[in-house]
Image: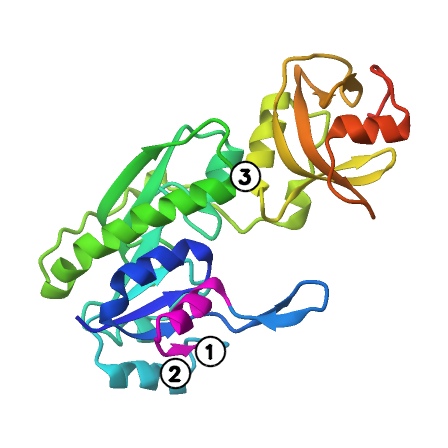
Amino acid sequence: MRLVYFGTASFAVPALRALADHVILVVSQPDRPSGRGMRLHPSPVKHAALELGLTCETPERSRAPEFVATLRGLEADALVVAAYGQILSVDVLESARRGGINLHGSILPAYRGAAPIQRCLINGDTETGVTLMQMDRGMDTGDMIDVVRTPVDPDETYGALQDRLAILAADLARDWMPRIVAGDYPRTPQDAALATMAPKLERIEGQLRTTMPAVEAYNRFRGVTPSPGAYLESDFGRIKIASARLGEGEGTPGTYLGGDELAFVGGCLRLREVQPEGRGRMALGALANGLRLRPGDALVSS
């Protein structure tokens, strides 16, 4: 097999490792600035490609004519795509004999788009999966080849679920790519009437409001952890939330209930690890002690 692998996020790394012996080129997003010094850092896929000794290209625009010409010159059997971050043009897809084969982190046609794993957690879904599909000119609209399903743990965060789905995606890629290259694979059209969308999350979607039902707030925490991150706008400034669980107490939304519990509508969250502005991480109880909050005092005014 001669495969070109398109991927950027950590979700795409296990499948790259599974197919590495057959990958003739890796394509990833350009290095981006991050961290306190805003230094340029490679994507997780580029980092893995270099570790594996694979050639990696990082075009700003994969549809640029000169890059499409490069792809055509490789005469690849197929493009394998996972969490790449750019929509591939028809010219790119047609550069390989079997076109583009995508590993998508949902049970299509649900959650088409950039954030399927995060959106399913925010919505409180109890099942998700990975779909292997033939790409076309639409966004995650192509024919399905295979789907693997898995239950969602009620305390699973985006980071943990993404890592688990990435392993399932790697298994799908390993099992199916030889058959796909040989032309021996099924194609089942999606039911467009059942389609839902999963647009990229904005940072503001990480805000937990104590006017939310506790279960809804907890699902939102799960869906944005570790990225883009959960936070509260409290009476004492912004508080980032790194670790949380549903609690058992009840009270006026926004009030501190004692221990690590903060009241939301119809319940509470145990904020096990928080980070106030300009300070290190700590449990909510430790923060409350520092602020001299007693049970019943407001941390977040409604």
Query: Please, is residue 124 above or below residue 268 in the view?
Result: below
- At x 48%, y 33%, the residue is 156
Q: What is the CA distance from the residue labelled 3 to the residue labelled 2?
A: 35 Å
Q: Which mark is residue 274?
A: none
Q: Amino acid at mark 2?
A: Phe
Contact (Cβ within 8 Å) of mark 3 with mark 2: no
Q: Which residue is mark 1?
A: 59
Q: Position of residue 280 (x, y in %)?
A: 77, 44
Tags 2 and 1 touching, CB below 8 Å:
yes
What span is in magenta? 43-58
Residue 77 percent location from the top left of the image: 19, 72
User: Which residue corresponds to mark 2?
Assistant: 67
Q: Secondary structure at mark 1?
A: loop
Q: Nearer the viewer, residue 77 or 284?
A: 284
Q: Residues within 10 Å of mark 3 (few under 14, many from 20)?
A: many
Q: Quarter holding the N terminus?
A: bottom left
The percent position of residue 125, horizontal first and vertical second, equals 44, 30
Residue 231, can we see it? yes
Q: Is residue 45 left or right of 35 when viewed as pictured?
A: left
Q: Earlier in the sequence, mark 3 or mark 2?
A: 2
The residue that label 3 is drawn on is 223
Find residue 292 and report its image quarter. top right
Mark 3 residue element: helix
| Lower sequence index among marks 2 and 1 | 1
Task: Please indicate, yes or no, whether residue 143 appears anywhere in the rendered image.
Answer: no
Residue 133, percent across and down?
Answer: 26, 53
- For the point 54% across and 39% down, the residue is 223
In the rendered view of the protein, which quadrant contains the C terminus? top right
Q: Distance between the Cα atoms at labels 3 and 1?
A: 30 Å
